[in-house]
Amino acid sequence: MRKNKEDTALTIERLLELARNQFTNKGYSKVNLEDVVREAGVTRGALYHHFANKQGLFRAVLETVQQEIAERVQSEAAKSDDVWEQLLLGCRGFVCAAIEERNKRIMLIDGPAVFGWEVWRAMDEQNSMRLLKEQLQLIEQQGNMQPLSVEALTHFLSGSLNESALWIAQQSNQTKSLEDTMNVITHVIHCFKC
Amino acid sequence: MRKNKEDTALTIERLLELARNQFTNKGYSKVNLEDVVREAGVTRGALYHHFANKQGLFRAVLETVQQEIAERVQSEAAKSDDVWEQLLLGCRGFVCAAIEERNKRIMLIDGPAVFGWEVWRAMDEQNSMRLLKEQLQLIEQQGNMQPLSVEALTHFLSGSLNESALWIAQQSNQTKSLEDTMNVITHVIHCFKC
DNA sequence: TTAACATACATACAGAATGTATGTAAATAA
DNA sequence: TTATTTACATACATTCTGTATGTATGTTAA
C-alpha cells in the first residue's frame, strides 16, 4: 500500500491543489475535508497524516499563495531600475495577482480570519508585505521621500492595495477599475517624492 | 414563564452584548453559542427564537458595531465646516473607533470572512463607507479635486484606514502610531486637492 | 538477507457544536 | 374568557473535526 516518495509528493500536491480550489470557491469554514480527500482519491487518514489539521492544510495553501504573489511582485518590480517606478510596478503586480479568484479570498479574506490578523501579518511579513516595506525603506534611505514614517506608510499602502484588489475583482469592467486604481496609486506615490 | 416586552428586549440586548464580547475575544468561529446563552441566563432556545442562527446573531452584532462607528465618524466630521477638514476628521474618527478592541475584529476581520467581502461591503455601504464616499463626491462636485475616480479613491482610502487601524491596534505606542498614520493620511489627502 | 522499524495511508469511533422539532407556560388579542 | 401568539426550554438529529488504531509496504541495519 505504501507509496514511494514520488507518489507521496503527488498526493500532497493533489491535496493542496484541491484544497485550494475548495477554499477559493466555498471559503474556509464551508470546506468539508471529506470532500477534499474524496476528490483526491484518498481518505481523511491521508490528509491528517500530512497536515496537522484543517488549519494546517489551509496554512500550507496560504503560504503557497503568498509566495506566488510575492514572486510576481518581485518580477514585475525588477522591470525597472528606478526605485519609484519599481514601487509602482510592484503595486500593480500585487493588485493584478490578488485580483485572481484563486488568490483573493484565501489571501485577503480568510487568511486574517483563520489565523488572526497578527499571525497573518507575520506570515505576510515574509512575502509581499516585506517587499513593500523594503522598497519604501530603500527610497527613504536615498533621501527622496517626504518625512513620513515608513512603517505607517507601508501599512497605509498595503491596506489600500488589498481593498482596491477586492473592489476591482468585483467590478464588471475590471480593466477600467484597475486603471482608475492605478491612477490613484500613481498620484499618491508621486506625492511621496521630495 | 413568558416575559413582557421590556423583559424580551432585555434578553435580546443581553444576548447581543455578551455575544459581542465573545466575538471580540475569541473570534467568530471559536465562539460557542452554549457559552453565550449560559452567561445570559437563558438556553439555546431563546437565542434561536430571536436570531436565525449563529450568522444571524453575528450580523446583528456587526450592524451595531458599524452603526456606532458611523455615528462617531459623523460627529467628528461635523466639527469642521471645511470639506477637506471634515474628511480628515472623519478618517481620524474612523481609525480611533476601529482601533478599539470591541470593534476591531468584528468589523475588520471576521465581518468579511463570515459574510464574504461583497455582502460585508454592502452592509458597510450604509455606514462608514457611505460617509467616506459621499464626502469625496461632495468635494469632487465642488471641483476641488484632482481628476481621479471617486469610486477608486473611496476604496483606496477605506482600505488604508482599515489596515492602518489594525496595525495601530497592535503597536505598543498607539498614540505615536496613530500620529504617524494621521501624518500620512493628511499628506495624501492634501495631494488630492486641486 | 532478513529482522526491525518507519511511513503512508485506511477505518472506525469519539466529541463538539450547530440547528431543528416539539412542548409549554404566560401574555396579549378577540 | 377564550383563542392565539410569543418566549422561551428541552430533547434530539446532523454534521463536522479530530483521534486512536490497524495494516501493508518501503527502508535500513545487522
Image (tube, coloured by chain):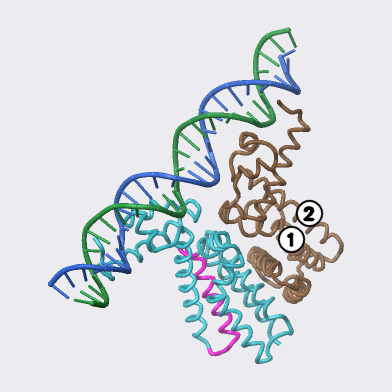
Chain colours: A cyan, B brown, C blue, D green
Residue nearest the viewer, comparing A117 with B117:
A117
Chain letter belonging to callout 1: B
Query: Quick check: marks 2 and 1 in contact, CB under 8 Å?
Result: no
- Residue A9 appears in view: no
Q: Secondary structure at mark 1?
A: loop
Most frequent secondary structure within the magenta stretch: helix
Reply yes or no: does residue B133 show up in magenta: no
Instruction: Give coordinates of residue A15: x percent, y percent.
Output: 37, 61
Residue B45 relative to residue B141: left or right = left
Q: Secondary structure at mark 2?
A: helix
Say which residue appears at 71% left-offset and 59% top-offset.
B101
Which region of the structure is painted magenta?
A81-103
Res. B100 mark: 1
First-in-chain label (2 vs 1): 2
Task: State which quadrant residue A140 falls in.
Answer: bottom right
* Kind of residue at disc 1: Glu
* Kind of residue at disc 2: Glu
Residue that badge 2 annotates: B71
Mark 1 Cα shell of 10 Å, populated few (<14), some (14-19), many (≥20): few
Instruction: Give coordinates of residue A133: x percent, y percent.
Output: 61, 80
- Give the CA distance from mark 2 to mark 1: 15 Å
Instruction: Give coordinates of residue B184: x percent, y percent.
Output: 73, 76
Relative vertical location of residue B163 with respect to residue A130 in this rendering, above or below:
above
Relative vertical location of residue B57 with respect to residue A3 in this rendering, above or below:
above
Instruction: Give coordinates of residue A24: x percent, y percent.
Output: 46, 59
